[in-house]
Amino acid sequence: MFEHLEREGAVVITKDGVPRSIMVPTTDATFLEDVQDLVFARARRAVRAIRVHAAQTGTDALTPAAIEREIKAARRARRRKTPRG
């Protein structure tokens, strides 16, 4: 498998024919950067999903004032739920 990894640059791991993981080569020198690249890729994907959801629900068109009202309402609701102690 490692020969294939070095030759192809990545190996897809499957279970019952369904992709489950991707194995990518790394070295001691590039390990941290490789992990950061994966984390950043996941973050980009999450932001893209948030933007799509916002466009689908119309929240991408909220004005700054409307956003501030939503934040204040959420904070008031949280204060009501949190017991003071």
Image (cartoon, rainbow, N blue to C red):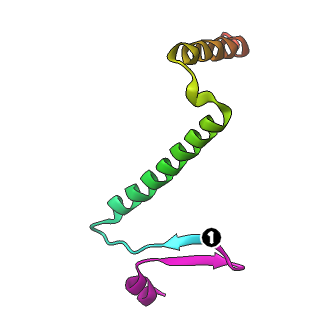
- The picture quadrant where one finds residue 67 is top right
In front: 71, or 63? 63
Q: Is 63 within the magenta?
A: no
Q: Residue furthest left?
A: 29
**Is residue 26 left or right of 38 when viewed as pictured?**
left
Q: Toward which corner of the image does residue 21 lie, by quadrant? A: bottom right
Q: Can you say whether 45 is above or below 17 in the image?
A: above
Percent position of residue 82, x then y: 69, 16
Q: Which residues are magenta?
A: 1-19
Q: Position of residue 5 (x, y in %)?
A: 43, 83
Question: Which quadrant of the figure has residue 79?
Answer: top right
18 falls in the magenta region: yes
Q: Judge whether 9 appears above or below 39 on screen.
A: below
Instruction: Report x, y in % for residue 2.
Output: 44, 86
Name the residue rendered at 64%, 30% in the picture. Answer: 58
- At label 1, the amino acid type is Arg
Nearest to the observer: residue 81 or residue 71: 71
Quadrant that contains the C terminus: top right
For label 1, the crowd category at 10 Å Cα-Cα, with few meaning under 14, some 14 to 19 and many 20 or more, is: few
Residue at 53%, 12% (x, y): give it.
65
Which type of secondary structure does the marked residue at label 1 adopt?
strand
Q: How many marks?
A: 1
- Toward the viewer: 53 or 22? 53
Q: Residue at x 43, y 51 (%)?
A: 40
Near-viewer residue (57 or 2): 57
Question: As drawn, is 16 to the left or to the right of 7?
Answer: right
Find disc 1 in the rendering and name its residue: 20
* Residue located 57% across and 22% down the image: 62
